[in-house]
Image (tube, grey):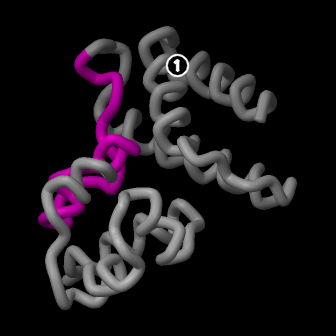
Amino acid sequence: MTTIGDRLRQIRLTLNKTQDQIAKDISVGKATWQNYEYGTTQPSYAVLEDLSKQGFDMNWMISGKGGMYQNIGVAESQNFPSEFTTLFLQKAYESALKIYIEKAITIPEKFSQNLFQEVSQILKTASTENEADLLLKHYLNRL
């Protein structure tokens, strides 16, 4: 069973950030972030809320239940089941990160938030899974 610290570490690694970088992103000290990961202290709601704004699921962060990413666009678009939405967001994150790494480009400060918004728009616009995949490919080609 994973702890909240394990899940915060997983988020940090998913974002391809150091402890120092993610600590600065959410306005805490490096030692504070390390304490979160090691389970010495629990993160505040404000920390979890900051991560939630980047597309990470609050329930998953706290309990480990469900998926790492929020189910986005489901309320606005009834086109896709929540399982597809979760997997689509995960695929978008992994694909975009791979592009940044392969091109040796620094990941932008608002990477997660921007990707989250783009994927949300794709899922609102697309009417089929194939169309969503095509729109994602166009977005990734622009990176």
* Residue at 51% across, 12% down: 126
Where residue 94 appears, x then y in whole percent?
Answer: 60, 53
* Residue at 68% across, 22% down: 134
* Residue at 64% across, 28% down: 136
Residue type (three-letter) at the residue carrying disc 1: Ile
**Quarter of the image that includes the N terminus:** bottom left
Q: Which residue is mark 1?
A: 122
Q: Is residue 56 above or below residue 118?
A: below
* Highlighted magenta segment, given as a residue range: 52-75
Structural crowding at the residue carrying mark 1, measured as other residues with C-alpha within 10 Å and reported as few (<14), some (14–19) or many (≥20): some
Closer to the camera in the image, 122 or 41: 41
Q: Is residue 23 above or below residue 122?
A: below
Q: Secondary structure at mark 1?
A: helix
Residue 103, magenta (yes or no) = no
* Residue at 46% across, 34% down: 116
Where residue 84 appears, x then y in whole percent?
Answer: 40, 35
